[in-house]
Image (cartoon, grey):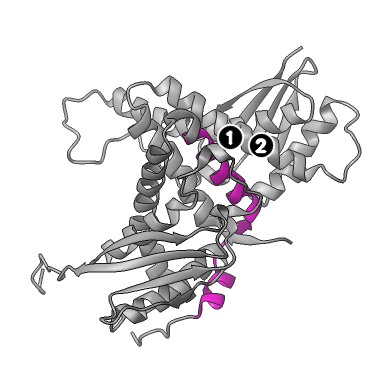
């Protein structure tokens, strides 16, 4: 094992990066903030997959590369493998992590317990806000996966589904 | 409850959750890179990194106090030693040395010879004026402010600018007396 740092270093820097982009740099343009956060993830994924595949033979097909992401790559980042991999055999893969490390401390309470939320405010808006904040945190890992696969020669689009926190599914659509 | 003995930096680091440093180093590098693209002005990037560090520091102090069991420092000299030997070690896995105290004991240098933030980093000529590690100074300033010390933290030496080590100057501006808004029985 090479050099290590406390996990809270990574957590802090990622959380603060998301907050800098969403609340300070592009507070009125969430779509631009999202693209920038994804771009940072892309860069990280691109470089990490380059390093982690240095001593491996080339992957023979898409499935081999995706399996590498699910096993080795995920273990390096999150100390566990992806729990479930599904595919429609037509270029779409769903990687499900039942306890995605970066979301384990995200609270997602639809009932506004906070007393300064006025009773008149629409509860669905509160949920929307929480969902929007959570989704901002997902652009980074989506970018990492897209960057890693792109580096392995597989251009794709990646999105995330968090309908059952802390489980998280990443949907990879390979571009043909 | 009996007071728990303070732990050494090594002991605390051995007990925290750790991740491989590449993820941290490359993530930080990618953030700096994107900020340079988006903000264009190097000075603005320095400011943004400092602000990010400050925001991190004001939260990280809680984790630090909870996990290190350090007790109240008797003076600023002890504070500096604790940052260098326990604080740096616990989060970054490296220690700093404390040197160059001024006569009245209110400013000193923290010297880092090994710094995981800069593995793989080289700065192009277009980044002159960038304090790549500016997040660190922000973290220290933010963390100390939460324990009632207003400080000014500046870079003196930077290996990415050709110096032989990283040197942070930490100057204690004032100690804010703690105010207790509560009565004992509340």
**Where does the C terminus of chain B fall, quadrant-wise?**
bottom left
**Where does the N terminus of chain B fall, quadrant-wise?**
bottom left
Which quarter of the figure has residue B63?
Answer: bottom left
The residue lying at 85 percent from left, 32 percent from top is A64
* Mark 1 Cα-neighbour bin, 10 Å: few <14, some 14–19, many ≥20: many
Q: Is residue A59 left or right of residue B35?
A: right
Query: Where is A98 relative to A125, above or below?
Result: below
Q: Is residue A92 left or right of residue B91?
A: right
Answer whether residue A162 is visible to the viewer in this image: no
* Mark 2 Cα-neighbour bin, 10 Å: few <14, some 14–19, many ≥20: many
Q: Which mark is residue A45?
A: 2
The residue lying at 79 percent from left, 35 percent from top is A67
Q: Position of residue A175 (x, y in %)?
A: 73, 14
Q: Position of residue B81 (x, y in %)?
A: 41, 78
Q: Which residues are magenta?
A: B8-35
Q: CA distance from mark 2 to mark 1?
A: 6 Å
The residue lying at 16 percent from left, 31 percent from top is A118
Disc 2 and disc 1 on one polypeptide chain: yes
Q: Which mark is residue A41?
A: 1
Q: Position of residue A65 (x, y in %)?
A: 81, 32
Given residues B62 and A103, the one toward you in this image is B62
Q: Is B20 within the magenta?
A: yes
Q: Position of residue B130 (x, y in %)?
A: 47, 45
Query: Where is B125 relative to A118, above or below?
Result: below
Cβ–Cβ below 8 Å for labels 2 and 1?
A: yes
Given residues B138 and B46, the one toward you in this image is B46
Answer whether residue A48 is visible to the viewer in this image: yes
**What secondary structure prevails in the magenta region?**
helix
Given residues A20 and A89, the one toward you in this image is A20
């Amino acid at each position: 094992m090479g050099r290590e740092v406390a996990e809270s270093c990574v957590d802090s820097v990622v959380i603060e990066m998301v907050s800098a982009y969403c609340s300070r740099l592009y507070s009125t343009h969430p779509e631009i903030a999202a693209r920038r956060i994804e771009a940072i993830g892309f860069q990280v994924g691109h470089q990490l997959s380059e390093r982690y595949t240095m001593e491996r033979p080339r992957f023979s097909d898409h499935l081999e590369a995706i399996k590498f992401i699910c096993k080795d790559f995920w273990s390096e980042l999150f100390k566990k493998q992806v729990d479930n991999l599904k595919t429609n055999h037509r270029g779409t893969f769903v990687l499900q992590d039942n306890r995605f490390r970066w979301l384990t401390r995200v609270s997602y309470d639809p009932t506004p317990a906070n007393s300064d939320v006025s009773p008149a405010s629409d509860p669905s808006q509160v949920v929307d806000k929480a969902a929007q904040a959570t989704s901002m945190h997902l652009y980074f890992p989506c970018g990492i996966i897209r960057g890693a696969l792109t580096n392995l020669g597989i251009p794709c689009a990646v999105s995330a589904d968090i309908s059952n926190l802390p489980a998280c599914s990443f949907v990879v659509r390979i571009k043909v | 409850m009996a007071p728990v003995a303070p732990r050494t930096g090594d002991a605390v680091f051995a007990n925290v959750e750790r991740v491989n440093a590449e993820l941290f180093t490359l993530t930080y590098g990618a953030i700096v890179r994107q900020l340079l693209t988006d903000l264009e002005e190097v000075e603005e990037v320095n400011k943004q990194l400092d602000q990010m560090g400050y925001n991190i520091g004001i939260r990280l102090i809680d984790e630090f106090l909870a996990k290190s069991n350090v007790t109240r420092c008797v003076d600023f000299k002890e504070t500096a030693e604790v940052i260098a030997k326990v604080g740096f070690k616990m989060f970054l896995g490296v220690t700093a040395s404390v040197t160059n105290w001024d006569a009245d004991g209110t400013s000193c240098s923290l010297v880092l010879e090994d710094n995981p933030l800069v593995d793989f980093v080289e700065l192009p000529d277009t980044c002159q004026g960038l304090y790549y590690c500016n997040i660190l100074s922000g973290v220290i300033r933010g963390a100390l402010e939460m324990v009632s010390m207003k400080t000014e933290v500046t870079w003196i030496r930077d290996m990415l600018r050709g110096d032989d080590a990283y040197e942070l100057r930490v100057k204690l501006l004032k100690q804010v007396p703690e105010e207790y808004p509560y009565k004992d029985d509340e």
